[in-house]
Image: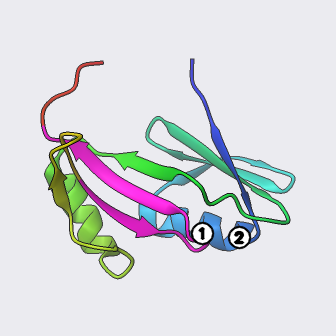
Amino acid sequence: MAGIVFFGTERLDRVVQFYLDEVDASVWIEQDGCTILRHGDFRFGFCERESADTCGTVTFYYDDRDAVDAMYDRLAHLARDPPRENEQYDIYQFFADDPEGRTVEFQTFLHPVSD
């Protein structure tokens, strides 16, 4: 089983290009007015709408701190703050914003998590 999270967008081309260029997502499926992206096992789509869905957080999970740090080095110009440990959730993370203001999180767990 798998799933897809969809967001309405007012700027389909710009938002999709952000995730392709900045996050290294790839196009999974193109549909009329919608693009579904893939990043590892994560599928997420954007569909043209009159208003943008900007609630929630789009989180990208990485296997280790080095990978999160590498994403921070790449996205420092968009990041809200440098990566930090979040003891409450036992994660290492940083946040950025996509072109429509969605919160985008890059994180790893500090201790191994079993499937």
Pointer 2: what residue? 13
Task: Verify whether residue 97 appears in magenta.
Answer: yes
Could you say where residue 64 lies in the image, as x and y percent from the top left? 17, 45
Quadrant of the image occupied by residue 33 = bottom right
**Quadrant of the image containing the N terminus:** top right
Is residue 107 positioned above or below 115 on the image? below
Pointer 1: what residue? 17
User: Is 76 positioned to the left or the right of 19 in the image?
Assistant: left
Q: Relative to the observer, which residue lies in front, 89 or 115? A: 89
Task: Verify whether residue 47 appears in magenta.
Answer: no
Q: Which residues are magenta?
A: 93-110
Could you say where residue 94 lies in the image, as x and y percent from the top left? 29, 61
Which residue appears at 38% of the width and 56% of the height?
105
Prevailing secondary structure class for the magenta stretch in the rendered image:
strand
Mark 1 secondary-structure assignment: helix
Quadrant of the image occupied by residue 114 = top left
Which residue appears at 22% of the width and 54% of the height?
67
Could you say where residue 106 lies in the image, as x and y percent from the top left? 33, 55
